[in-house]
Image (spheres, helix red, strand yellow):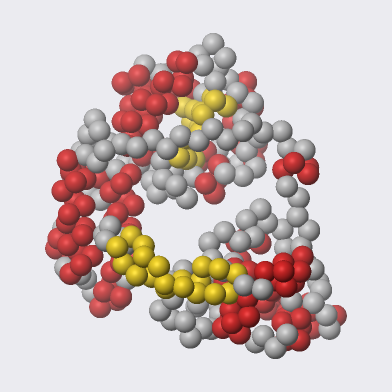
Amino acid sequence: MSHNFKNLMFNTRHARVSGLGNPEGSTKAMNMLFAIRTIQERTGRDLGATFLSGTTISNSLTELYLLFKYLRPKEMERQGITCFDGWAAVYAKKSTDFEFSVTNQVVQKERFRYFIKVPELANFYAEITDYKTTEDVGVDRPELNEQLYHIPPTPQQEIFIQKLIKFAETGDATYIDREPLSEAEEKAQMLIATNYSNKMSLDMRLIDPEYGDSPGNKASHCAAKIAEYYYKYLDQKGTQFVFSDLSTYKPDQWNIYSEIRRKLVEDHNIPEKQIRFIQEANSDNARKELFRDINSGRIRFLFGSTQKLGTGVNAQERAVAIHHLDIP
C-alpha cells in the first residue's frame, strides 16, 4: 500500500501553481523516507525497498517525482536533479487554462498538465517498475456499466448555494450561519467552502440537523434506486453495495447510512435484517462471516467507506449494483 505514503515533503518555487498537493508533507511519509534512506546507505545503491500499489499515480505529477525521490536518489543525483523544480524542468510542462472555481465561476489556473521527454521518462520509470493488468493475471470481471444519476437541487440547497457563493467571495462566515472566521480559518477559507459544498450536495442535515428531510434529497433518490434493483433481482437474491466517505455510520448520531436504511425499511418495505454496515464488523472473523452472508444472499445490502469496503472484500458473487453517494 505504498500509495499511503505519497504525501512526502518537497520544496518548490511554483507556489502559485495549482494541483501540486501539500509541499509540507506528512510525518508518516517522512519516517518512511528515513527508513528507506538508511537501507540505501547500507548498500550504497538504489536498492532495498519494494513499493506495491494499484494507484501509483492518481492525482498529480508530483507523485511520480516523489516515487523517484524514494527509490532512485542516486540516479536522480547522476542526472543532476536535486529537487522537484529540477525534475519538473526536465520532465514536466505547465500551462494556464480556464477552469470552474468552487463558486462555479470561470477562473484562470496554472497547472503542470503535461509530461515532456516522455520516452526518457518512461524508460526511467520502467527501470524500477513491473506492472500487471487485470488481463495479465486473469481477473474475471464484468464490463463497466456506469450510470451517472443526476438529480436537481432541493429548494434548500438552491438557497444555500447562493449563500456559499457569497461566503467564498467575501469571507463573511455569517452568510453560511457560522461565527466570523478566525485568523487561522481565513487562510483556509476556500477549504471551508469546499467542505460545506461537499456536505450540502450529500445532505443539508450534515450542515445543520434543523434542515430536516426532503423527498428530493440524495438519500431519497438513492433509496428508491436501491429498492428498484432489489425487487428487480429478488428471485436471484441480488446484493448491492453503497459507498459514502463523507457521512459514515456512527450509532449515536445522524448519518447517511442510517438514513437510507430507514427509508428502505419505511418507504420500500425492505427487511431491516438484510441491511448491514461494514463498520459493524470490527474483527476479521466478523468480516468473513458478513461476507459469507452476503455471498449466500442472506444479507442483501452492505454500506461502507472506500477505505473499509473498497479493497479486500470478496463478497460480490450476487452483486447487481454498486452505488456511490460521494465520488472519492
User: Nearest the camera: 270 or 58?
Assistant: 58
- At x 26%, y 38%, the residue is 152
**In terms of depth relative to the viewer, which is nearer, 88 or 185?**
88
- Would you say residue 201 is visible in this rendering? yes
Q: Quadrant of residue 74?
A: bottom right
Whole-percent x and y of residue 286?
A: 60, 35
Position of residue 318 relative to residue 277, above or below, is above
Left or right of 283 on screen, residue 68: right
User: Which residue is painted at 76% across and 86% down in the image?
Assistant: 78
Q: Quadrant of the N terminus?
A: bottom right
Q: Nearer the viewer, residue 109 or 70?
A: 109
Q: Is residue 103 left or right of residue 210?
A: right
What x and y, as percent, mark residue 204?
25, 45
Asked if residue 33 lies left or right of residue 194, the reply is right
Which residue does the image show at 27% across and 61% down from the upper left?
A: 105
In the rendered image, residue 149, in percent from the top left (x then y), is placed at 39, 35
Residue 20 appears in the picture as rendered: no
Residue 184 image-quadrant placement? bottom left
Out of 205 and 127, give the one closest to the viewer: 127
Against 108, residue 211 (above or below) is: above
219 left or right, relative to 209: right
**Outermost residue toward the top?**
235
User: In the displayed structure, would residue 11 be above or below residue 22?
Assistant: below
Q: Residue at x 70, y 71 (%)?
A: 121
Quadrant in which residue 175 is drawn? bottom left
Work out whether 45 lies above or below 108. Answer: below
